[in-house]
Image: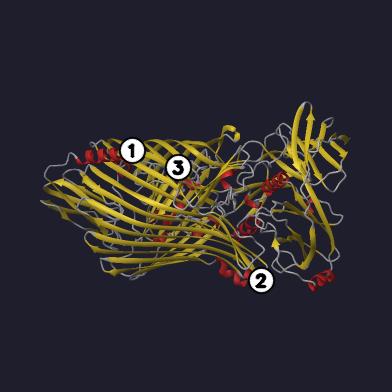
């Protein structure tokens, strides 16, 4: 989908050598600030963190008021329950040893208004290996390397993945490219994801992070990406992402496991890979029909 | 139910037949062009003494039943010499008439004509017509004459996205228009992602658009029927015509098979933008294909006076290949075999076998294998249409048809790959049938009625697996149907009626009611028409869409029919309208039906139309004031919200001026209120992203749209048999930046701030086209 919209449309518009983009002023309504909950359970941290804030009007500066003095409780399906402590304004956390396959429930109480959500921490799927290959000459950039991530999808289980590739020490979202995919068409197969939205240069240290998502978390990211999807032509019916939070709260309560790998980009690394070249089949990111690069 | 319908059909037949028993005789035949031998659609035959008459049908056939006597018959058609023939009628007989064109100007397309006051007299309303001649001179983008874009200049018909061929009729969705080419449905009428239509105007003879008030012989869509007839080919002499444009070129060859007995036409068009890619330095662009083509073919042969056969076909395709990396293609194939049979002077039968196939797909390359995702829809239709010319006051149409639909919602084909598991969404099959009777009755000189009944049925048949879903989209029940077993059946009785009260020669008031049912639906989640839109049939979960439309109109002509004016108001109520859940997945989703939500719609408005028909300056002004809303329980708790295509004001002004024999100038100006859209009202931050907050569905408006196009046509003097013309046009002449889309993003230099970005497409696009004929 992404590929169709991002390649074909600009192409056709270019063909008609007529498109032009500019920033315009428009009036948008002012709305009552809404409660925003941003929390996730992962296997990678010994604590659970939930952030609570409020939304602002669209053209206001991006300063989101923190919501303090909320009662935030986490419980699991084994009967454990803990109240999170507010460590800084709007940020609530607690040490917790998470476990795969366990369902976690969140309860937030803000001034008597209650919000619920639950999510199951999936079983981890690990990265088998990462590899690089020179950027092919059809890309819009050249001279560097593309990153491939190889994994083995467990058969018979619906799996949902998110792949994040970034340079080390660079946590700006703008520089990360995020792919989202499921195993609907590749269940039980060896999957190779190729990172064709950006290239890396020699001596870059690249961190590849594969997240295995709970279905509700996947649905949140997927519908979130469709808000940004559509590129220049826009989405016909943009709507708020599908969340597992009750009572009209924005945001999500996610659960995902993380598998990480690091790679130093160098011509030697490429040679080494060529030496033990295995099957050279890549599932390019563009294929997965829901995969989208979030800007 | 069925017996009731049959009974009522018989009653109608009997009432129509009664009252004609006296000493009457019938005159029948064909009216044709002396120039090309093609039948003239809607030409009039007028009996001077009785002040009555008839008009030819779409094959040029007419039949008049009159008391014995001597009469003067006037045959007329606009653009042709009137011909008066004194006739003595003592017994039934046949008379074919050939009319001579009036002038020597370029007449390769017959000018549409009717009785000059047809709009006053005929019991029909909500009908839009355009002559191919008007289509030729009205300026369009890149000089590609396009019937679908030109009809959007008429009131009640509004444009989809800028520059595209998708259109909305009286607030109905794009898929609520049935476009038929020689009776075959064309499921996707667009090229180049919607910027051009598939109809090559060289191959088109006539078109008519019914805005939801079609007579009972038409049906299948809620909002409109666009009936397009292809040219039949010159049965007098061989001729070639064509044109060279910036985007594409056209060539048409027509010739008699046997003079005056049969003819054929072959008309082709191909775009050639991609040929310039060869000069590109970029290797990928060099190996890029981006083109479309159309091929129209038609042949007809007169076996004898009572039998004539027509065979027509259309083949069109869009191809986009980006080297071997990515491909996108779609196309229509249609074929129609028709047999006209005249049983006797009064009973005319057309039998048709119709085939239509639309397929669309895209492909990705990985590891040197192309992986294709393909979808499609295929129809086979058998149709019988009778026309019974009882007498000058009674015409009866009746018939039936049955369609077998095959839908392929999605399939992945990978060659030589074990990486992908094969995947296919089950094909779906359905029968759609209809039987109708329609009666045109002149009760008196002042009252004319056209009414009819259409009974449609739909049966989804196996093999199929039907799921039942609960509120959280989980499957709660699975039913498996074997081949040809009926999974779900629907039937709708669709009454239609139009009453015309003719006050005098220049004034009339009309009222109409129509019910329509639609059993196929287009799912689209994008504002452009992408080949990833999916057609699905009605099923257990998807009920047929139903519309009831009421319309009232006042028609007035001035100055000897030089000016034609009308006011029409309409109210349309729609049921089982389809919308999408938030975050719906449409493409390659086995459970796509679980992603849909259903509700009701309503549309109402008023259409004003003033047309100057004759003189050096011709043209029209159309204005529509309208409202279109939807109500869906799952969206804002069922509150009415504006449909995307809701347009408060829509204005078109079209002018054509014949300066002299060589120069014709034209201009059109359009204005409309922006579409209803959803814009964010707030924003928040989660997981490092700035995310917009949407509140009301379609609660905002795009900016108003307006644009002026100008054109000029230069026709040099004809040399021997060679004729040519030059067409110059300027699209969006004052360079208005109309918003094609408005998107929102973080500011590049300051990510805490957000901004709105407008994309505008076409500003001041000049073009030149050369046309020739010999």
How far apart are labels 2 and 1 at the CA level? 62 Å
Secondary structure beneath dot 2 equals: helix
Chain letter for mark 3? B
Secondary structure type for disc 3: loop
Q: Which mark is residue B285?
A: none
Kindly identify the residue that appears in the image at 79 percent across and 29 percent down. A110
Disc 1 to disc 3, C-alpha distance: 18 Å
- Graded by Cα atoms within 10 Å as few (under 14), some (14 to 19) or many (20 or more), the crowding at tag 2 reads some
Asked if one can make out residue B79 in the rendered structure from this viewpoint, the answer is yes
Q: Is residue B541 above or below residue B237?
A: above
Disc 1 is placed on an element classified as: strand
Percent across and percent down for residue A48 are 84, 41
Front-lying residue, B482 or B698: B482
The x, y position of residue B219, in whole percent, is: 39, 46
Q: Is residue B655 left or right of residue B590?
A: left
Count neighbours of disc 1 (C-alpha within 10 A) and say few if under 14, some if 14 to 19, many if 20 or more. Answer: many
Q: Are marks 1 and 3 in contact (CB under 8 Å)?
A: no
Same chain, labels 2 and 1: yes
Tell me whether the residue at label 2 lies in contact with that at label 1, contact meaning CB atoms closer than 8 angstroms. no
Label 1 marks which chain's residue? B
Q: Which residue is mark 3?
A: B156
Q: Quadrant of residue B342?
A: bottom left
- Residue under pointer 1: B498
Asked if both marks, 1 and 3, belong to the same chain, the answer given is yes
Q: Nearer the viewer, residue A123 or A236?
A: A123
Question: How would you rate the neighbour count of disc 3 (Cα within 10 Å): few for under 14, some for 14-19, many for 20 or more?
Answer: many
Residue hosting label 2: B283
- Measured as percent of width and height from the top left, residue B571 is found at 44, 35
Name the N-terminal-most of marks 3 and 2.
3
């Amino acid at each position: 989908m992404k590929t169709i919209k991002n390649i074909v449309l600009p192409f056709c518009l270019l063909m008609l050598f007529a498109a032009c983009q500019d920033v315009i002023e428009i009036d948008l309504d002012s709305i009552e600030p809404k409660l925003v909950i941003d929390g996730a359970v992962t296997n990678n941290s010994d604590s659970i963190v939930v952030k609570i804030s409020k939304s602002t009007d669209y053209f206001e500066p991006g300063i989101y008021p923190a919501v303090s003095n909320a009662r935030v409780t986490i419980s699991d399906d084994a009967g454990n329950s803990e109240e999170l402590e507010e460590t800084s304004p709007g940020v609530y956390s607690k040490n917790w040893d998470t476990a795969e396959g366990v369902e976690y429930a969140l309860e937030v109480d803000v001034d008597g208004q209650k919000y619920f959500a639950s999510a199951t921490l999936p079983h981890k799927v690990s990265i088998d290996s990462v590899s690089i290959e020179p950027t092919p000459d059809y890309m819009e950039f050249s001279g560097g390397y593309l990153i491939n991530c190889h994994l083995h999808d467990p058969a018979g289980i619906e799996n949902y993945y998110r792949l994040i590739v970034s340079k080390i020490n660079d946590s700006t979202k703008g520089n990360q490219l995020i792919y989202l995919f499921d195993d609907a068409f590749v269940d039980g197969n060896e999957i190779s994801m190729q990172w064709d939205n950006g290239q890396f240069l020699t001596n870059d240290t690249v961190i590849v992070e594969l997240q295995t998502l709970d279905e509700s978390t996947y649905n949140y990211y997927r519908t979130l990406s469709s808000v940004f999807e559509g590129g220049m032509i826009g989405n016909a019916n943009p709507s708020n992402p599908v969340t597992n939070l009750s009572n009209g709260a924005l945001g999500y309560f996610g659960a995902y496991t993380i598998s990480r790998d690091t790679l130093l980009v160098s011509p030697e690394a490429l040679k080494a890979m060529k030496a033990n070249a295995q099957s050279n089949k890549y599932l390019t990111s563009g294929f997965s029909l829901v995969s989208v690069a979030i800007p | 139910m069925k017996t009731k319908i049959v009974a009522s059909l018989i009653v109608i037949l009997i009432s129509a037949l009664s009252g004609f028993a006296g000493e009457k005789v019938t005159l029948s035949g064909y009216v044709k062009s002396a120039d090309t031998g093609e039948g003239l659609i809607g030409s009039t035959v007028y009996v001077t003494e009785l002040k009555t008459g008839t008009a030819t049908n779409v094959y040029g056939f007419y039949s008049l039943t009159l008391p014995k006597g001597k009469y003067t018959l006037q045959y007329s058609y606009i653009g042709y010499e009137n011909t008066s023939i004194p006739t003595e009628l003592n017994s039934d007989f046949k008379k074919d008439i050939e009319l001579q064109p009036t002038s020597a100007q370029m007449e390769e397309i017959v000018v549409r004509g009717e009785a000059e006051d047809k709009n006053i007299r005929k019991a029909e309303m909500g009908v839009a017509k355009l002559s191919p001649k008007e289509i030729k001179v009205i300026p369009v983008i890149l000089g590609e004459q396009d019937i679908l874009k030109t009809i959007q200049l008429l009131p009640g018909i509004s444009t989809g996205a800028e520059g595209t061929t998708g259109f909305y009729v009286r607030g109905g969705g794009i898929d609520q228009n049935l476009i038929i080419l020689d009776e075959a449905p064309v499921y996707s009428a667009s090229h180049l992602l919607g910027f051009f239509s598939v109809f090559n105007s060289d191959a088109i003879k006539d078109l008519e658009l019914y805005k939801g008030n079609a007579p009972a012989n038409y049906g299948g869509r809620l909002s409109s029927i666009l009936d397009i007839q292809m040219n039949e080919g010159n049965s007098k002499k061989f001729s070639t015509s064509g044109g060279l444009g910036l985007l594409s070129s056209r060539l048409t060859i027509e010739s008699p098979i046997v003079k005056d007995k049969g003819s054929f036409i072959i008309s082709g068009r191909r775009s050639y933008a991609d040929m310039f890619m060869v000069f590109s330095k970029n290797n990928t662009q060099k190996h890029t294909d981006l083109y479309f083509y159309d091929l129209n073919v038609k042949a007809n042969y007169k076996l004898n006076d009572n039998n004539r056969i027509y065979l027509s076909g259309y083949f069109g395709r869009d191809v986009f290949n980006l080297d071997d990396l990515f491909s996108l293609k779609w196309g229509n194939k249609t074929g129609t075999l028709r047999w006209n049979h005249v049983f006797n002077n009064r009973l005319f039968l057309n039998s048709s076998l119709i085939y239509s196939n639309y397929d669309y797909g895209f492909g990705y390359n990985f590891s040197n294998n192309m992986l294709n995702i393909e979808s499609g829809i295929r129809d086979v239709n058998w149709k019988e249409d009778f026309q019974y010319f009882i007498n000058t006051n009674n015409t009866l149409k009746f018939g039936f048809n049955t369609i077998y639909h095959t839908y392929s919602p999605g399939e992945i084909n990978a060659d030589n790959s074990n990486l992908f598991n094969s995947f296919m969404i089950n094909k779906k099959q359905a029968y759609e049938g209809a039987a109708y009777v329609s009666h045109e009755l002149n009760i008196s000189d002042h009252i004319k009625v056209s009414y009819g009944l259409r009974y449609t049925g739909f049966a989804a048949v196996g093999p199929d697996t039907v799921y039942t879903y609960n509120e959280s989209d989980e499957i709660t029940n699975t039913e498996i149907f074997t081949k040809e077993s009926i999974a779900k059946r629907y039937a709708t009785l669709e009454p239609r009626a139009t009453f015309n009260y003719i006050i005098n020669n220049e004034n009339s008031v009309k009222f109409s009611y129509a019910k329509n049912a639609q059993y196929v639906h287009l799912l689209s989640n994008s504002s452009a028409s992408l080949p990833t839109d999916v057609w699905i049939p009605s099923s257990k979960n998807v009920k047929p869409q139903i519309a009831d439309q009421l319309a009232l109109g006042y028609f007035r002509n001035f100055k000897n029919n030089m000016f034609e004016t009308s006011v029409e108001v309409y109210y349309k109520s729609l049921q089982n309208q389809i919308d999408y859940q938030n975050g719906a997945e449409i493409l390659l989703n086995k459970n796509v039906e679980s992603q849909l939500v259903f509700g009701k719609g309503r549309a109402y408005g008023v259409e004003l139309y003033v047309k100057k028909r004759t003189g050096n300056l011709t043209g029209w002004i159309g204005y529509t004031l309208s409202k279109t809303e939807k109500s869906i329980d799952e969206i804002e708790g069922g509150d009415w919200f504006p449909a995307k295509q809701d347009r408060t004001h829509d204005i078109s002004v079209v002018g054509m001026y014949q300066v002299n024999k060589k120069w014709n100038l034209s201009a059109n100006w359009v204005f409309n209120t922006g579409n209803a859209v959803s814009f964010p009202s707030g924003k928040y931050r989660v997981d490092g992203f700035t995310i917009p907050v949407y509140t009301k569905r379609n609660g905002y408006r795009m900016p108003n749209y307006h644009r002026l196009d100008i054109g000029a046509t230069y026709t040099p003097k004809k040399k021997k048999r060679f004729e040519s013309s030059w067409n110059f046009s300027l699209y969006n002449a004052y360079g208005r930046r109309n918003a094609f889309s408005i998107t929102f993003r973080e500011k590049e230099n300051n990510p805490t701030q957000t901004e709105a970005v407008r994309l505008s497409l076409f500003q001041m696009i000049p073009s030149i086209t050369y046309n020739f004929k010999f």
